C-alpha cells in the first residue's frame, strides 16, 4: 500500500500520524478568532488545519417545519433549525484565503470539506492539496465523483455508513479519478462516547478497501485517538477550540490548545511504541541485564567443599551463572576458595 501525499506531508505506514485540527464553527463568527485558532493549532503541533466550505443555503432551505428542526434531547443543537445552525457555523468563503495563507505561513497543510459542487469549484481555485468528504456527505456520490476528478487526495469520513455505502463511496472516488484515498472511522454523535467509537473497525477498513485509514474523533480527551493509532490509524482529525467556556456550535466536543498538544504528543508516542515484533534485549536494555538474578556464593566456600543450598543463592545482580543452572550446580565441588559475594562461574567448579 503506497502512502498518500498531502501537500508536502507523507501519510501512511512508516510515518507519524497526520494530525488534523478541524476548525469547523469554532471561529464563533470572527475571522480574528479563526486566525487565532490556526495559530493555536500550529503551536500545538498539528500537521494540518481543515475548514468546512458551505453556506446555509447550499446545505438546506430556510424552513421551520418539523423536518428542518433538530430533534433529540442529547444533541447540543436540539430545537434549532438546520438553516439557523448552518448560518451560524459556516466559515464565510472570503475568509478562506486569509485563513489558508496563515496556516501555510505557519508550516501547516490546509484543506477543506466541500459540501456541494460549487464549494469544490471554489476550493479548486484556491488550489487546496486535498479534499475531505464529511460523514453526512458520504452518500452524496455526485459530490464524491466531482471531488475525485480534481486529481487530489480524497479523505472520506465513514460515519453512519454501512459497509455497502462505504463501498459505494470508495467506488465513486476511484472511478472518478482518485488515486490517493483515506477513510476515516467516525461516529457521528456530538460528543461521541468511547463505547460507541468501535475503533476495532480501523484495520478491517484497511483490509477491505486497501487504503490508508484514520479516525475522525468526536470523543472527549485523547484516549480513542491513541488507541486508534495502535490499531493502524495514520490520520487523526479532531476539533480545536480556544476555550470550551467560550461556547460555539462545536465547543462541547473540541479540544483546547493544551489538550490538542497532548493529542499530537501521545499519538506520536503510540506510533513510535508500536515498533516491530522483537524478542531479546535491545541495545538500549543491555545495561539492565545486570539487574537480573544469577547464582552467587553467600557463605565462604573452601577448596574441595560442595556447593549447597546453604552457601549459594539466586540473587541480584546478574554477573553469575544463570538461575536455570541452579539445580545442576548444587553438589558441585569448589575448585578453589570462594569468598562470600562472588558470582558463581563455571571455572570455579570441578
Image (cartoon, helix red, strand yellow):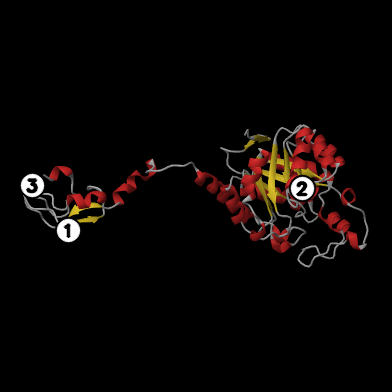
Q: Secondary structure at mark 1?
A: loop
Q: Estimate how packed mark 3 is, as few (under 14), some (14 to 19) or many (20 or more) residues with alpha carbons within 10 Å.
A: some
Residue drawn at point x = 70 percent, y = 38 percent:
181
Q: Which sits in the foreground, 200 or 88?
A: 200
**Residue holding disc 2:** 134
Measuring 30% from the left and 51% from the top, which residue is drawn there? 292
On the image, numbered disc 3 is attached to which residue?
A: 336
Label 2 Cα neighbours within 10 Å, binned few <14 / some 14-19 / many ≥20: many
Residue 216 position, x and y percent, is: 69, 50
Picture coordinates of residue 215, whole percent (x, y): 66, 49
Q: CA distance from mark 3 to mark 2?
A: 79 Å
Q: Observer-nearest residue: 312 or 40?
A: 312
Count every numbered label the image shows and give the total.
3
Decide: is 259 above or below 172.
below
Q: Which mark sits nearer the N-terminus, 3 or 2?
A: 2
Mark 1 crowd level (few <14, some 14–19, many ≥20, 10 Å Cα):
some
Task: Give the farthest residue toward the bottom.
Answer: 73
Say the numbered circle drawn on residue 244: none
Question: Tags 3 and 1 in contact by the CB under 8 Å rule?
Answer: no
Q: Which residue is mark 1?
A: 309
Secondary structure beneath dot 2 equals: loop
Give the foreground label among 1 and 2.
1
Q: CA distance from mark 1 to mark 2?
A: 71 Å
Query: Which sits earlier in the primary sequence, circle 3 or circle 1?
Result: 1
User: Image quadrant for the N terminus?
Assistant: top right
- Can residue 107 be seen here? The reply is no
Image location of residue 14, percent across then percent down: 56, 37
Cα–Cα span, label 3 and label 1: 18 Å
Q: Nearer the viewer, mark 3 or mark 1?
A: 1
Indicate which disc, 1 or 2, sits on the residue closer to the N terminus.
2
Image quarter of the C terminus? top left
Q: Horizontally, is 38 left or right of 349 in the view?
A: right
Amino acid at each position: 500500500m503506497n502512502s498518500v501525499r498531502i501537500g508536502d506531508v507523507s501519510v501512511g505506514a512508516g510515518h507519524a500520524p497526520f494530525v488534523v485540527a478541524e476548525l469547523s464553527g469554532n471561529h464563533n463568527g470572527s475571522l480574528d478568532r479563526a486566525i487565532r485558532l490556526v495559530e493555536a493549532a500550529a503551536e500545538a503541533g498539528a500537521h494540518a488545519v481543515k475548514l468546512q466550505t458551505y453556506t446555509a443555503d447550499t446545505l438546506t432551505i430556510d424552513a421551520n417545519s418539523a423536518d428542518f428542526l433538530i430533534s433529540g434531547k442529547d444533541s447540543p443543537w436540539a430545537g434549532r433549525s438546520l438553516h439557523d445552525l448552518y448560518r451560524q457555523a459556516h466559515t464565510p468563503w472570503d475568509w478562506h484565503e486569509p485563513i489558508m495563507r496563515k496556516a501555510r505561513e505557519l508550516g501547516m497543510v490546509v484543506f477543506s470539506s466541500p459540501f456541494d459542487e460549487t464549494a469544490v469549484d471554489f476550493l479548486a481555485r484556491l488550489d487546496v492539496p486535498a479534499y475531505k468528504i464529511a460523514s453526512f456527505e458520504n452518500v452524496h456520490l455526485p459530490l464524491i465523483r466531482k471531488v475525485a476528478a480534481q486529481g487530489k487526495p480524497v479523505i472520506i469520513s465513514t460515519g453512519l455508513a454501512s459497509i455497502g455505502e462505504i463501498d459505494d463511496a470508495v467506488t465513486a472516488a476511484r472511478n472518478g479519478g482518485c488515486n490517493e484515498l483515506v477513510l476515516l472511522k467516525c461516529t457521528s454523535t456530538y460528543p461521541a462516547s468511547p463505547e460507541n467509537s468501535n475503533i476495532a473497525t480501523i484495520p478491517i477498513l484497511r483490509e477491505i478497501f486497501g487504503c490508508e485509514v484514520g479516525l475522525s474523533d468526536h470523543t472527549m480527551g485523547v484516549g480513542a485517538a491513541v488507541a486508534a493509532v495502535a490499531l493502524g490509524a495514520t490520520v487523526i482529525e479532531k476539533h480545536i477550540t480556544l476555550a470550551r467556556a467560550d461556547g460555539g456550535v462545536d465547543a462541547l466536543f473540541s479540544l483546547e490548545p493544551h489538550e490538542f498538544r497532548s493529542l499530537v504528543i501521545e499519538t506520536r508516542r503510540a506510533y513510535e511504541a508500536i515498533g516491530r515484533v522483537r524478542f531479546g534485549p535491545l541495545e538500549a536494555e543491555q545495561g539492565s541485564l545486570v539487574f537480573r538474578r544469577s547464582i552467587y556464593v553467600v557463605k565462604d566456600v573452601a577448596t574441595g567443599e560442595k556447593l549447597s543450598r546453604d552457601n549459594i543463592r539466586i540473587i541480584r545482580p546478574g554477573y553469575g551463572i544463570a538461575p536455570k543452572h541452579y539445580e545442576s550446580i548444587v553438589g558441585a565441588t569448589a575448585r578453589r576458595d570462594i569468598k562470600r559475594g562472588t558470582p558463581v562461574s563455571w571455572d570455579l567448579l570441578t
